[in-house]
Amino acid sequence: MIKQQKNENIAPMKVNLFIPTLNAGKIWKEVLDGVAKQSYPISRLVIIDSGSTDGTLDLINEQTCDLIQIDKKDFDHGGTRQMAAETFSDAEVFVFLTQDAILAEPDAIGVMIQAFEENPEIGMVYGRQLPHKNAKILETHARLFNYPAESKVRSMEDADRYGIRTISCSNSFAAYRKTAFLAVNGLPAGAILGEDVLIAGTMLLEGWKLAYLSHSRIHHSHDYSAIQ
């Protein structure tokens, strides 16, 4: 496990955490509990809700988080996250998490921040996705295949080796250095999916590096059938 090295003479990087929600369901409390247990200080927890009716907002404490409410028809995977980051831009790192992703350890976000501190060329990092504890075999295999135990830092120089997988990443649990995020104009609006790989590709083209951190982990999986 990577241990965060703290220098008492260096102020911690300011972190804002963004979570889009829509009827987050029974798992939502576990997601919030995982956030609350993080050892690295989170400056702002920002919830972007697009019309929940299942009690999702009942678990939100507006004294400890910021709430943005939008209409469901206005939700856009890239544009909504971009809007939230622009609204609450007072941080050096933007972390994005989905409503069904449970942070696996208290240092999950701290490991991400350590990567930024140790390598100023890294513009984006993303964590390892482990299957939920009750996940079926198909989804368990998919997570273990796509999110291996070895961490990697990738750049455009790796494109010949990895091909399209050079820009593999996921906003289910990802963090962006604000300066890199702004340098490429943030997340693209209008993308029905893949806003994360689009910004990753742009960052690499602009000379930034992308890191996959196997020790920064979440539990996140879906009960899809083989056809799905």
Image (tube, rainbow, N blue to C red):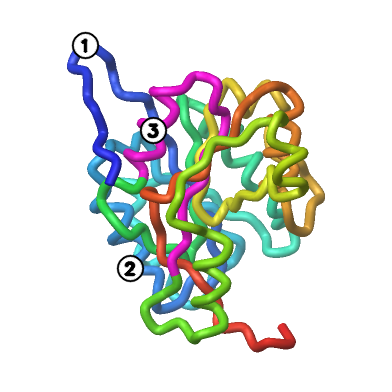
- 60 or 156: nearer the viewer: 156
- 141 or 173: nearer the viewer: 141
Identified by mark 2, the residue type is Glu
Q: Please report contact status of discs 2 and 3: CB closer than 8 Å, yes or no.
A: no
Please tell me how crowded label 3 is: few (under 14), some (14-19), or many (20+) other residues with Cα within 10 Å: many
Q: In the rendered structure, which disc, 3 or 1, sits on the residue that comes first in sequence? A: 1
Rendered-image quadrant of the C terminus = bottom right
Name the residue furthest front.
161
The mark lying in front, picked from 2 and 3, is: 3
Tell me residue 160's x, y (percent). Answer: 77, 39
Asked if residue 129 is among those painted magenta in the image, a careful observer would answer yes
Tell me residue 178's x, y (percent). Answer: 55, 26
Q: Is residue 114 visible?
A: yes
The count of marks equals 3
Numbered label attached to residue 113: 3
Q: Which residue is mark 2?
A: 30
6 in relation to 82, above or below: above
Q: In the structure shown, which secondary structural element does the residue marked by tag 1 occupy? A: loop
Residue stretch rendered in magenta on the structure: 109-130
Numbered label attached to residue 105: none
Per the model, the C-alpha gap separating discs 3 and 1 is: 16 Å
